[in-house]
């Protein structure tokens, strides 16, 4: 069953007097439980596509069906609610709050959602990431790999169907990056859909499908 169906997506940016076609009639289908890499050079459109798939932005044209719901033209508040329910994000720069502990960082999305057992769920997510002994540490007391594990724990703590990772190994050495990819593969084996935006071939090869972008279009691997 398709969890993502994007049809004829167009996104145009106007910079000064220039018009940039960031997405040029893009079609993409992703099935539940897939692990997909979105690859391409800088400026290929992969970040713009990620923002739309992650409900961080809306297309100028086209249709985006997420988990059976057309989210193409939703009001930003409604889009945020959909995003928080369905998608967990992992970023290259971790995006952890520096003055909060690992546990507090992971608790945060649950507190925003008004979940009463936030601490218990956050602790469980950190244990799953092998960080039972690092819960009270702040980000500056953790290695890069540990910080990314905290970020992954935060992404999964709301139990989203989709994990969307943007260059998740970009700030890590190759050994630590490989460990992070093993964690992603484990999450995928548990049934989560993973979309990994990357320019690194070593990261992309871990995914069952690679979607390659060029000049705002998908040139290979778009699926059905």
Image (spheres, grey):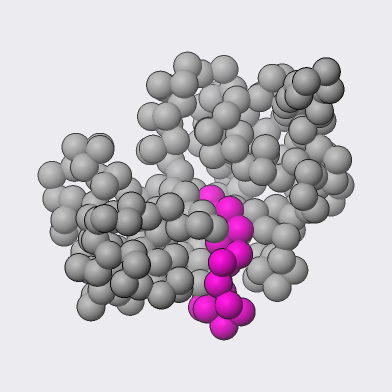
The quarter holding residue 217 reads: top right
Residue 56 in the figure: left or right of residue 136? right
* Front residue (pair 21, 206): 21
Magenta-colored span: 164-179
At a point 25% along the width and 37% down the height, the residue shown is 113
Residue 18 in the figure: left or right of residue 36? right
**The N terminus lies in quadrant:** top right
In the image, residue 184 above or below residue 56: below
Q: Residue 182: percent from the left, percent from the top? A: 52, 75
Q: Residue 118: percent from the left, percent from the top? A: 18, 50
The single residue placed furthest to the left in the displayed view is: 116
Q: Residue 58: percent from the left, percent from the top? A: 60, 25
Please check the rendered image and state whether residue 168 is part of the magenta-colored stretch, yes or no. Answer: yes
Q: Residue 10: percent from the left, percent from the top? A: 75, 26
Please check the rendered image and state whether residue 150 is part of the magenta-colored stretch, yes or no. Answer: no
The quarter holding residue 12 reads: top right
Residue 124 seen in the current view: no
At a point 14% along the width and 50% down the height, the residue shown is 117
The single residue placed furthest to the bottom in the displayed view is: 175
**The C terminus lies in quadrant:** top right
In the image, residue 149 above or below residue 35: below
């Amino acid at each position: 069953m398709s969890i993502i169906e994007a049809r004829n997506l167009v996104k145009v940016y106007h910079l000064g007097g220039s018009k940039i076609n960031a997405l040029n009639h893009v079609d993409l289908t992703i099935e539940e439980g897939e692990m997909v890499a979105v690859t391409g050079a800088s400026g290929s459109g992969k970040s713009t596509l990620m923002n739309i798939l992650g409900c961080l932005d809306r297309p100028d044209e086209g249709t985006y069906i997420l988990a059976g719901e057309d989210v193409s033209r939703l009001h930003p508040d409604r889009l945020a609610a959909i995003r928080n329910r369905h998608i967990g994000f992992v970023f290259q720069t971790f995006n952890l709050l520096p003055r909060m502990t690992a546990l507090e960082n992971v608790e945060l999305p649950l507190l925003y959602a008004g979940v009463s057992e936030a601490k218990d769920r956050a602790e469980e997510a950190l244990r799953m990431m092998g960080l039972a002994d690092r819960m009270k540490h702040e980000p500056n007391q953790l290695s890069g790999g540990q910080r990314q594990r905290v970020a992954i724990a935060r992404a999964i703590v709301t139990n989203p169907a989709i994990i969307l990772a943007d260059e998740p190994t970009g700030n890590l050495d190759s050994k630590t990056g490989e460990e992070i990819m093993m964690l992603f593969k484990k999450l995928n084996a548990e049934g989560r859909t993973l979309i990994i935006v990357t320019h690194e071939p070593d990261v992309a090869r871990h995914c069952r499908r690679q979607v390659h972008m060029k000049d705002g279009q998908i040139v290979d691997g778009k699926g059905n």
